Amino acid sequence: MFLSVKEMELRKVRFDETFEPGQIDFTSEELTQASPLAAKGTAELLAHSGGQMRIQGQIQVEMTAQCDRCLGSARFNLDSGFDLFYRPASQLPAEEEVAIDEGEAEIGFYEDGGMELEDVLREQVLLALPMQRVCSDVCKGICPACGKNRNETECDCKLESHDDRWGAALRKIQLK
Ligand SMILES: [Zn+2]
Ligand SMILES: [Zn+2]
């Protein structure tokens, strides 16, 4: 769905869309959309802002990714609101563009008379995901010695953890 500035000049644009898996491309992010993505919201032009666009809404979707620790499947139920501002890229001198990018990450730019809603949603999904993609907070990960998934099988590998080494160093000091 194209959110057109021309249409926003006349009225606030409302959207209430559902995107089936595959309609928005997440392959480059190593993510899979596991449920339809529901998006609801509004897009409007802000008065006397030189063409600044505000897109507000809510997304609901279930995503899956590879767990950072055990490489199994991690599921994420996203239900998050967003409130984004976009400026017309054409109205910005090149040097100002750089300054804004560094300081105000929440401001984006639009070209060609509007924004594709799919692009907005894609970015929102990425922002709503946690930095660490883990299947569970208690995921034990993969054993670095034998390579087994420690959530599935307990292995007998004796691993010297960081804490143990610290303890050993302390004991050495105390012996002196
Ligand atoms: Zn895991
Ligand atoms: Zn092991």
Image (tube, rainbow, N blue to C red):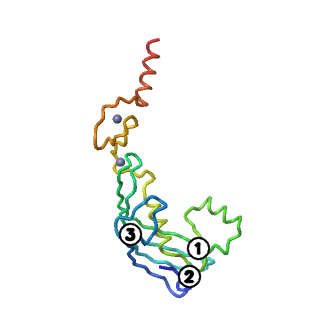
* In the depicted structure, whether residue 100 falls above or below residue 51: above
* In the depicted structure, whether residue 44 falls above or below residue 158: below
Residue 104 x/y as whole percent: 59, 62
Q: CA distance from mark 1 to mark 2?
A: 10 Å
Residue 74 x/y as whole percent: 36, 54
Q: At 41% from the left edge and 70% from the top edge, which residue is drawn?
A: 22
Identify which amino acid the numbered label 3 is placed on: Pro
Query: Residue 60's quadrant in the figure?
Result: bottom left
Residue behind mark 1: 110
- Most extreme residue toward the top, as rendered? 176
Residue behind mark 3: 21
Label 3: state its secondary structure: loop
Mark 2 and mark 1 in contact (Cβ < 8 Å)?
Answer: yes
Disc tally is: 3
User: In screen coordinates, is 97 left or right of 40?
Assistant: right
Picture disc at residue 5: 2
Identify which amino acid the numbered label 1 is placed on: Tyr
Q: CA distance from mark 1 to mark 3?
A: 25 Å
Residue 40 x/y as whole percent: 40, 75
Label 2: state its secondary structure: helix
Query: Residue 47's quadrant in the figure?
Result: bottom right
* In the depicted structure, whether residue 40 falls above or below residue 174: below
Picture disc at residue 12: none
User: In screen coordinates, is 107 left or right of 136?
Assistant: right
User: In screen coordinates, is 135 left or right of 91?
Assistant: left
